[in-house]
Each structure stands twice: as structure tokens, then as C-alpha cells.
Image (cartoon, rainbow, N blue to C red):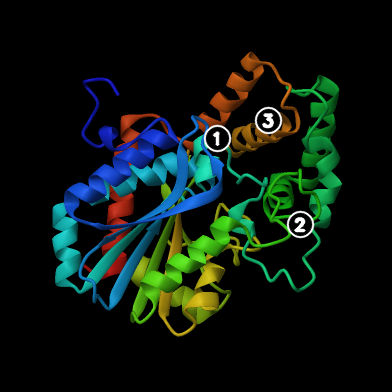
Amino acid sequence: MPASASPIARCFARSYAEARQKFLTAARQTGATLTEFPHPTQTGHEGETLAMDVAWVGADDARHVVLVTSGTHGAEGFCGSGAQVAMLGDTALHADCRAAGVALVLVHAVNPYGFSHLRRVNEENVDLNRNFMDFDAPLPQNAPYAEVAPFLLPPHWPPSGEDQAALMKIVAEKGMPWYQAAVSGGQYQDPGGLFFGGHKATWSNYTLRRILARFGAGRDTLRWIDIHTGLGPWGYGEPIYMGPDHADQIGKVRAIWGNSVTSIYDGSSTSSNLTGLAWMAVPQTLPAIDYAGIALEFGTLPLGEVLEALRGDHWLHRHPEADENQRTLIKQAVWRAFYGDADDWRDGVVAQVTEAVRRGAGI
């Protein structure tokens, strides 16, 4: 970071290794209890250890927990990590939470592999926020994805004019909302495709459920904020309801976080209706807890550019022989799609996440 960088900017990193070090250092400085869940098989882009790290800030016997997760979609972790580091240094927030009997639980890098390797998915090309399924039951069919899939990942990148025209033709015929839902809704048929939900629970899925059970068991309430990027207006953190399609539950979440909370179920969200979302781990592990949750989705680039970045990244995943120049261009597009590299964006992220935590804590 340049010397003129704002104090908030210094909380953010430009690699997973740097982000993890900032998080661990900030947690130790504030006296948080740290727990490390190292990845058993994978290493990072720089050969570094990968882990899901948990910082507990508050009394051991706190009855109420506010959980903040980052990096569920790896490359989106730069945003959430920076906000978590900033909150670890926010002593006023810690004092107010402690006075209210609330503990903060910050889970850093739910998908450390994607975070380090600048991919949205994990080491198995699985979108973790489509992976919380009952894999003993028949998996859903995404017929619209199968319809558009032949046009998404062409043999060459960038796509030829002919390939791009074919994709644009079906988008023009069906509409952008159809295209977004078809691509992003989650699919379980093509392991090498976009938004693949997997055929079994991943390490991150299993580990997140372990964390919920370990830190949530015996508590009275759990308020969960999962930080994401890539949809919506620049720097705006859209609060998206994270729970079942029940009117009373949605009303409860809006009572906590305000009427600006949107929902994938009624079309008010910039997100499409999705399958296999991570919040489903809560009823699986803590069925009796009083739960409410939101995703905070911070906008970066227009939707079309974000989807193009994801298409390029998946093309690269399928073509490891790509030259270094092409690899660099594709990864730069992913970086821009999921991180707003500007002080106004970072400042806004920290302010909005902190406000959401305060609302979740009832302070």
C-alpha cells in the first residue's frame, strides 16, 4: 500500500497470504481467541498454508453470537477479510458487544483455496454457496444452464466474434434475468462448468459446519453476516435475506436489519434464486438456535462484465496450457470483478459491515 493509504485501506490485502497474516496479527493484538482449521490437502498460490481461521472476540460464556464470514467465494475474500481486520481493531465495537452479552465470531476465508488462487470456486471447481445440499437425494436439474452451456466456454479466449454473437443471441431472446438465473442458479451436472454445486460435501462445507457446532452449541442466538461481492451498484452492500422461504423469518430479519433487506424468493434481490446455500448448515448443526442471517453483497462492475470474468476464469481452468500473458489478463479481470480497489469502496465496505454487525448485535 502507498504511504498515503487511508487507515482503512491498510486493513485490506492484495494476496491471500497477506490477508491471512493481517487477520491473525489483528486478532492477536486485540486478544481474540484464535482457532485454525488447516486445509488437509491443498496449498496456496505462493505455496503457503491454507486454512479457515476463526477469531472469537468476547466472553467465553456469551449467550449471543454474531458470526461474520469472508471468502465463501474465494476471490471475494479480499473484501470480507479487510472488513474483518478493521473490526478486530474496533475497540468501541468490542466494548459495546461485550456489554450486550454478544460475542463476535469472525471466520476468515471459508474457501482459502479460491482466495489464494484467485478463483471464485474451490479446488474441485465447486461453488461453495451451492454445495449445501442433501447429496443422498436426487439433485436438481438446471435445464436453462444446459441450454446456454454450449455458448459459455468456447474453445478459445477471448471468444471469437461468432461465438460471442451466438451467446448474445440467446441472451437477447431470453433476457438478462433469464441468463443470470440460468448461469448462476447452481448446476450439478457439469463438474467443469460454471456454478457447479458438487456431488458431495466439500472440506469447506464440513469445516464450516464444525465451526458452527463448536462455537454455536449452547448459545441462545446466532446472527450471521456472510460478505460477498460482484452484484449491484458500486460499493453498495445489498443486505440479502439468508434463510428459508418463510414470511415470518423474512419479517424477523427485516426487523433486525431494516426494510432494505431483499430476498431471492420475491425477486427483490439482485441475486437470482439459488440452491445449496451455506445458511442451510445452521438447521443441520444447530436446529434449536434462534437464527437470522443476511449476505452483504457489495457491487463492483456491471453484471455482464462480472459474468465475462467468470467465463474467462473457467476457460483458463480448462486450459492450463494458456500462456502467461493470457493468464494475467484473465486474473486481472477476476480481481476487478470481485474487488473495488479504491478508498471510497473500502471505506464504505467497512462502514456498512460494522453497521450490520451492530444491528445483528442489537447495539
Which residue is the site of mark 2?
188
Please state which amino acid type lies under the numbered disc 3.
Gly
In the image, taking residue 160 as reference, residue 63 lies left or right, namely: left
Task: Looking at the image, tell me whether mark 2 or mark 3 is earlier in sequence order.
Answer: 2
Mark 1 / mark 3, whichever is N-terminal:
1
Query: Where in the figure is residue 225, as x and y percent of width and height?
Result: 40, 60
- The quadrant in which residue 339 appears is top left
Alpha carbon distance from label 1 to label 2: 23 Å
Q: CA distance from mark 1 to mark 3?
A: 14 Å
Q: Exactly how many numbered labels are in the figure? A: 3
Instruction: State left or right for residue 306 relative to residue 20.
Output: right
From the image, state whether disc 1 or disc 2 is nearer to you.
Answer: 1
How far separated are the C-alphas under marks 2 and 3?
20 Å
* Amino acid residing under circle 1: His
Q: Amino acid at mark 2?
A: Tyr
Viewer-nearest of labels 1 and 3? 1
Looking at the rendered structure, the secondary structure element under dot 1 is helix
Q: Which residue is mark 3?
A: 312
Report if residue 110 is visible in the image: no
Residue toward you, 31 or 139: 31
Mark found first going from the N terminus, 1 or 2 = 1
Q: Residue at x 66, y 50 (%)?
A: 126
Q: Residue furthest bottom?
A: 288
Q: Is residue 185 visible?
A: yes
Q: Could you say whether the residue bearing mark 2 is in a helix, strand or loop?
A: loop
In the picture of the structure, the residue carrying the numbered disc 1 is 117
